[in-house]
Amino acid sequence: MNANPSRVSRVSLELYSDYVAPTTTTEEKLIAIWSKIFEVDGLGIDDDFFDLGGDSVIATRLTSEITKTFGAKFMVGTIVERPTIRQIAETIDSTSGPDLPSHVFALQTGGDRTPLFLVHGAAGFFFPHAEYMRAFHDDQPVYAFQVPGYDGQVQPLDTISEIADAYLEAVYAISPEGPWHLAGMCSGAWITYEMARKMIAGGKKPERIILIDPFIEEGKMREQYELSRRDNTKSPFAHFAYWNTRLKSWRHEVRDRIRCWRATGHWIEPMDERAMAIPEVRKWVLEQRLRFVGKQTLDVDNLQETFENESLINSYRSDSGVYASEKLRRAFFKYQPDMPITNRIDIIASEFLNQKLSNPHNPICKFMPNRNVIVAGKYHTDTVSTNTSANSEIIQHLLDEPIEP
């Protein structure tokens, strides 16, 4: 059998750790998985995921293989805090630890600072690079969420409000009495907004509310935005924009119904919550979603809502992961905020978003009147990136500063 020419030996890599051989069956199985995916021979149990060049795509592949091999769900975010084979084996073999729901995981524990809870973007999970985490103090607890149902342990939820409730339940399980810091990426900023709104309505008060380049999704929120512009301006353009948005929504609905009927024999709009209950329609919708993401390109000029490696990540997601992500997309489509938050909100914004905030009818302006805008990055993809410490440095700086009224 010929050796794979793309594989390399561990000794040829400049790793920081000394070689340590596996001593348990779990460690041996993990080394086999890592060797296969990283295409590196001779790995030891103290070799670090990030030293080997690990990223979100590789983490997704590892998570999938670990789940298949050990017959238990393994969360992708665990790799951030426990990045070596030894540590992951201990996690798999351990029966101790806090009984937390599967949609929350620790990125960094220890220390007595106020914990930070980070909400993912439209992709449905949050996986930062090691450089991103280095911006946080060693004693700064950091937790992150993945959309419920991503790992198949629970059924995905239908609305942003339900997701916010599930995340708050996890927040209170970790820190019942508080205090708490909340942050949200991109579209997930609206989940964070809902969490904060529900906290405040319940007589609780988050300390920092940090939103990283909030994104206005197509759907009800966009229609709400255009309707507000139409009703509050005499500009013919605003009227045209509103009716154009409505027309586009109607055309998309009719087009999608026709496509669904041709593919499945069911005349139903795929965004209808009943659609996913029909097996043929659900299968078709998920197949279409994978093809759609695979065709996307990172077009910063048109500011499409895309993420680095998104198509590759989707190709390694489980069926439950794709389903949960699709349900999340539908939840964003139906969501529209309805109550302003008067608490101080810090917004880390791209130059593009900062320009949009000059429009008073923008949902961010309407529902977050007490906002502090920090411009960081030219485009959306620069600002929300978790491959560098650009926005995490700003987040930690905000956490260190006293909160102004």
Image (cartoon, helix red, strand yellow):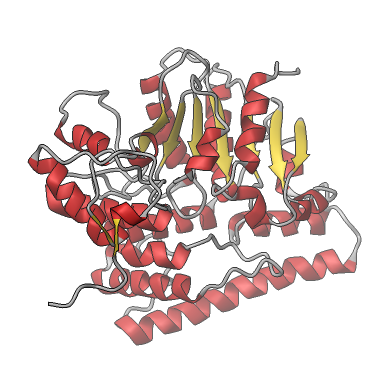
Q: Residue furthest right?
A: 234
Number of numbered callouts drawn: 0
Q: Quadrant of the N terminus?
A: bottom left
Q: Is residue 58 left or right of residue 129?
A: left
Where is residue 261? Give x, y as percent.
37, 83
Residue depicted at 63% across the width and 56% down the height: 381
The residue lying toward the viewer, choosing from 139 and 187, is: 139
Q: Residue furthest left?
A: 25
The residue lying toward the viewer, choosing from 126 and 292, is: 126
Instruction: Decide: is 176 above or below 127.
Output: above
Give the quadrant of residue 37.
bottom left
Where is residue 139? Give x, y as percent.
49, 19
Q: Residue furthest bottom?
A: 262
Where is residue 97? Give x, y as percent.
24, 23
Q: Could one spot residue 216 in this view of the protein? A: no
Where is residue 237? Give x, y as percent.
86, 68
Give the quadrant of residue 258.
bottom left
Q: Is residue 201 left or right of residue 232?
A: left
Q: Quadrant of the C terminus?
A: top right
Q: Could one spot residue 151 in this view of the protein? A: yes
Give the quadrant of residue 370.
top right
Instruction: Decide: is 165 above or below 58.
Output: above
Residue depicted at 37% across the width and 35% down the height: 104
